[in-house]
Amino acid sequence: MPIVDLDDIPTRYESIGSGPAVLMFSPGGFDSSLENWTTFGRYKDLGFIPALSQSYTCIVFDRRESGRSGGRLERLSWDKYVAQAVALLDHLGIEDAHAMGGCVGCSTAALLAVAHPQRVRSMVLFSPAGGVTYRAAQQRRFTQHLGFVAEHGLQAVVELARSTGAGFSKDPRVGPWAAALRTDDAFAASYAGRDAGRYATIVSGTARLLFDRDTVPGPEPEDLQVLDVPALIVPGEDLSHTRSAARYLQECLPDNEYWDVPVAEQTPESSQRRVLDFLARH
């Protein structure tokens, strides 16, 4: 798969199929690799890539600090994730695309539409992440990571990350830069030599910036309320993908279709059909 430097961050991506572009923001939290559309949780059975690529060009990619993409030791933000997506569209020469997010990918897809509405034809927000328990779990993960750093140091984080395949979502000790620590020797060396106090500031600031509300993180509600990009919202129904998060998006977005069916009825066939029908009308 090709890897391109976007703002000096290597980004792995793949274009599958032909037709109008669908930029796909992967599920999986801090382990948002492109493979997650076919291997992660519900998505391995939903079959979106094979179904959509018959009529569309599916653009999948590793979010920065995930998969084989690189990273940068800085305070992470939703805006930085959007910047990566825009740079990828520019690299591919794509003026506008449908945006589809799964899980936490919905936050970046929605914020892309807010920041660059002229470049987003429509949004598919499938099982958006959010809710009181979700926010608490994310912030607890950062706290656990900082506890490991305080006790063992940054070099120990590098060694642990390189000794296991687990990402930040499964093992908070390895931190949000685990993927880059495994694939980039220069980054790992620089990371291990950083001042621990400043590192703690970056990490705590990231946690506060990314997960600052008890609903869908990312775009501000007032920005969503004046957004004219049409959206299909498909609810989840567990503690990380609450129905309240999906209803929040329904409340905020003026041009939306809410697929009000339980997860048990979101079969591969019905889900593919619903998404394809929506995309075809936009």
Image (cartoon, rainbow, N blue to C red):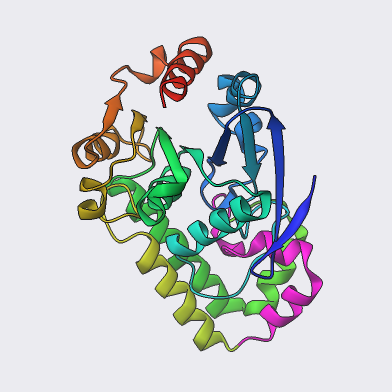
Q: Is residue 8 magenta?
A: no
The answer to whether any part of residue 70 appears in the image is yes
Q: How many marks?
A: 0
Placement of the C terminus among the 4 image quadrants: top left
Q: Nearer the viewer, residue 214 or 46?
A: 46
The percent coordinates of residue 46 (x first, y second) are 55, 21
Residue visible at 53% across and 15% down in the picture: 268
**Picture layout, residue 212 above or below residue 275:** below
Answer left or right for 27 relative to 115: right
Task: Determine which quarter of the picture holds residue 66.
Answer: bottom right
Q: Nearer the viewer, residue 198 or 278?
A: 278
Answer left or right for 185 relative to 53: right
Q: Which residues are magenta?
A: 169-194
Q: Nearer the viewer, residue 79 or 181?
A: 79
The percent coordinates of residue 200 (x first, y second) are 48, 80
**Picture layout, residue 112 above or below residue 65:** above
The percent coordinates of residue 80 (x first, y second) are 50, 64
The answer to whether any part of residue 104 appears in the image is no
Residue visible at 72% across and 41% down in the picture: 14
Q: Is residue 174 magenta?
A: yes
Residue visible at 64% across and 66% down in the picture: 71
Placement of the N terminus among the 4 image quadrants: top right
Answer left or right for 65 relative to 205: right
Q: Specify the principal SS of the magenta part.
A: helix
